[in-house]
Amino acid sequence: MNEIPYKIYLTEEEMPNAWYNVRSAMKNKPAPLLNPGTHEPMKAEELAPVFCEELIKQELDNDTAFIPIPQEILDFYKMYRPSPLVRAYCLEKALDTPAHIYYKFEGNNTSGSHKLNSAIAQAYYAKMQGLKGVTTETGAGQWGTALSMACSYFGLDCKVYMVKVSYEQKPFRREVMRVYGADVTPSPSMTTKIGQKILAEHPGTTGSLGCAISEAVEVATSTPGYRYVLGSVLNQVLLHQSIIGLETEAALKKYDIVPDIIIGCAGGGSNLGGLISPFMRDKIEGKLDTRIIAVEPASCPSFTRGVYAYDFCDTGMVCPLAKMYTLGSDFIPSANHAGGLRYHGMSSILSQLYDDGLMEAVAVEQTSVFEAAEKFARVEGILPAPESSHAIKVAIDEAMKCKETGEAKNIVFGLTGTGYFDLVAYEKFHNGEMTDYIPTDDELAVFRAKLPVIG
């Protein structure tokens, strides 16, 4: 085997030219979206007022394995893709571990994260449909930034509802969106009926992704020429993000590297789902015995403490019902939670895979996440996003287990983006103002009791 370089790059010719749909390999398909009124599976025509036509086809397609990437999207990808797969030699040395650690770095674009992979696809299909603009929500701001860039590229209007606590804590991320022409509103707001209702019921709330989704959907469905787009959770988003896993797979194969452990942070599931897609196919088919670990925050533990049930995707209860691991659509993480990954539920695809025992999940406290982030930054030279740092934390934990056993396992994790717009959170960590709030069982039971009754 050739010596493994610090960075493994693919050439432009080696870039994937089709997205991979992991649902095609799943023996148990993810449960369908349900109409909240009838509880029947949603049909394409029912989704049409909310989503773009081509994206609806992708959302409902459980069988097509590879979906060609349009040339216009491939041309855009080439501005920042293929992204590097990096061997973390410096981290390995600092940990004194025999493990081989690799990370797929998705922060080498202006949005600073993997979100651009799907944003450009969704903006493209909106443009091809002849729409005037799109609406969306954003939590920490990566998705809103990416979508504002994509809409600017295609000349589309972009209306972003940003979770209020992030709007206030991350003004620079907000301003980047405005640089690219987006209209950014803190959520919940008084600009929508749902926002007014949420504020009346929860005065002073710092907001949640569920709130912001409700507002964005209301505006999209009531404004001619607009549709709603989402940065995570949905099948179509995981499909677009499969570009991450396909590139990772190709880079590893260049050096005959077989991953023993693959780790990704998990909020709604977009980056994790994209990273693991081709490897999950091989695992389902019995060709690979890789451990796949989802890492979530202890303050928003959908996998590890949620229930697998149908729930609303939004707090306003206007979106379809999705079967997922959920804490309840009313759940709002503590305002002290600064590490992102704030969504109350998890992708239906990942939820089904987790329920089938094909992947693991672990919840970690945010102070330990920022400790891992700092350790990584000091030796690898990249300031990681707090979301990504959840994966870093568990990658370090697994590498230290290898130190105890002497095993030279291949550990791969997703470095979803950079943390240069997250310095308020880093400041709180350094000043000792960050705490590890973890919801009690009684608190979670209140939200669980409000889950819709199906059938």
Image (tube, rainbow, N blue to C red):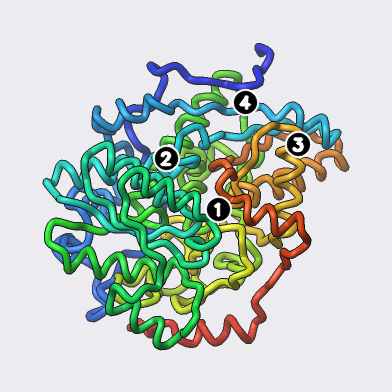
The residue where tag 2 is placed is 242
- CA gap between label 3 and label 2 equals 30 Å
Report the disc number at residue 257.
4
Q: Residues within 10 Å of mark 3 (few under 14, many from 20)?
A: few
Residue 24 visible? The answer is no
| Quarter of the figure with residue 298 | bottom right
Using residue 9 as the reference point, say whether residue 39 is left or right of it.
left
State the SS at label 3: helix
Q: N-terminal of the two: label 1 or label 2?
A: 2
Q: Residue at x 42, y 88 (%)?
A: 201
- CA gap between label 1 and label 2 equals 18 Å
Q: Nearer the viewer, mark 3 or mark 2?
A: 3
Q: Nearer the viewer, mark 1 or mark 4?
A: 4
The residue where tag 1 is placed is 358
State the SS at label 4: loop
Q: Residues within 10 Å of mark 4 (few under 14, many from 20)?
A: some
- CA gap between label 4 and label 2 equals 19 Å
Residue 39 visible? The answer is yes
Q: Is residue 89 above or below residue 24?
A: above
Q: N-terminal of the two: label 3 or label 2?
A: 2
Location of the C terminus by quadrant is bottom left
Report the disc number at residue 378.
3
| Quarter of the figure with residue 89 | top right
Residue sitting nearer the eye, 334 or 357:
334
Q: Residue at x 36, y 58 (%)?
A: 184
State the SS at label 1: loop
Q: Nearer the viewer, mark 1 or mark 2?
A: 2
- CA gap between label 1 and label 4 equals 21 Å
Disc 1 residue type? Leu
Q: Residues within 10 Å of mark 2 (few under 14, many from 20)?
A: many
Q: Nearer the viewer, mark 4 or mark 2?
A: 2
